[in-house]
Amino acid sequence: MLIIDRVNMIHYMSKDNAPAARCKSGDTVIFHTYDCFQNKLLPDNASIKADCPSLSNPATGPLYVEGALPGDTLKVEILNILVGPLGIGGSEPIGTFQNKMVEPIEYKIKRIQVEDGFAHIFDNLSVPIEPMIGVIGVAPLEMPIRTIIPGNHGGNMDCRQIKKGATLYLPVFVEGALLAMGDLHALMGDGEISECGLEIEGSVEVRISIIPKTGRIAPALCVDEKWITIASKESLDEAAKEATNMMADFLTSQVNLNPYDASLLLSLCGNLIVCQKCNSYKTMRMELSLDILNQLEQKPELI
Ligand code: CA
Ligand code: CA
């Protein structure tokens, strides 16, 4: 099995990154990843100010997929996510907007043990972990994009549905696709309101396949019997509009609904959800049940 060590670390998604490894369509690959602070905050005496990795968000990779060409879709099946024994949460007081105008609020980190599938958040509160991938994407066609930025190439989408059992579909913009991932979270609520999930090191096992010549332009996801479009824009409103438009386009172009029926269906059965509102580009998703698509005789797998 091909394993990519986390020393192969990038901070930009870029067509100029040298491949850390190469695979063929159908191969299974394991990515080992640092947490988003490059593990620098794990020691007891580390402080977010002193070391200031400032959400450097490294991603492991990139992986060159032999035969992947611009216009193809990269199908990434997430077979497993394992996380380490210690994670980092971050917080600032909620409801302190007035105070913020007067004095800066201190951002605090908290080291949180993960053990036997539970995160011990407080002394009297342990919660089952739900590991997910914060950053996963391919190289964009043009300028390099920092791994902290989400977009049509994927990147820092912080979508909690990108988890074990999910299949992520990413557009291919450059030869080889150049897939990279990192920023695992053992837990994160939709919205990621404090700019931190439960940031943690770990490993991700994926199966990579190429679907030729789809012309896909943005990420989509299939998980938990749902088809999901994902959009990242400078505002939540724009991201909401884009995620909705992508699902509506799918329904009109692939399922052959007219625009009014697509809108009706999404208003009655689609769920528009905030993935993250903390990055400079915000991410939202539109979810539609596969059961509905199956009744309309459409299989997203073929897209
Ligand atoms: Ca993130
Ligand atoms: Ca993170």
Image (cartoon, rainbow, N blue to C red):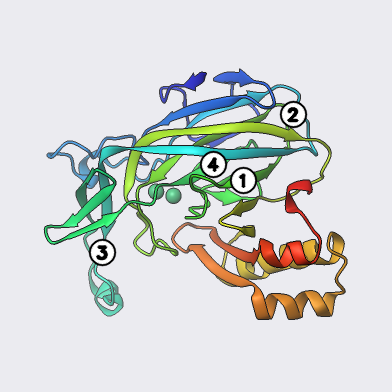
Say if residue 242 shows up in the picture.
Answer: no
Frontmost of labels 3 and 2 is 2
Count of marks, rendered view: 4
Disc 4 residue type (three-letter)? Ile
- Residue pointed to by mark 4: 136
- Residue pointed to by mark 1: 168
Frontmost of labels 1 and 2 is 1
Q: Residues within 10 Å of mark 4 (few under 14, many from 20)?
A: many
Mark pair 3, 2: CA separation: 43 Å
Compare residues 287 and 20 and report the one nearer the observer.
287
Say if residue 55 shows up in the picture.
Answer: yes
Q: Residues within 10 Å of mark 3 (few under 14, many from 20)?
A: some
- Residue pointed to by mark 3: 92
Q: Mark 1 or mark 3, which is nearer the start of the sequence?
A: 3
Disc 3 residue type (three-letter)? Glu
The kind of secondary structure element at disc 4 is strand
The kind of secondary structure element at disc 2 is loop
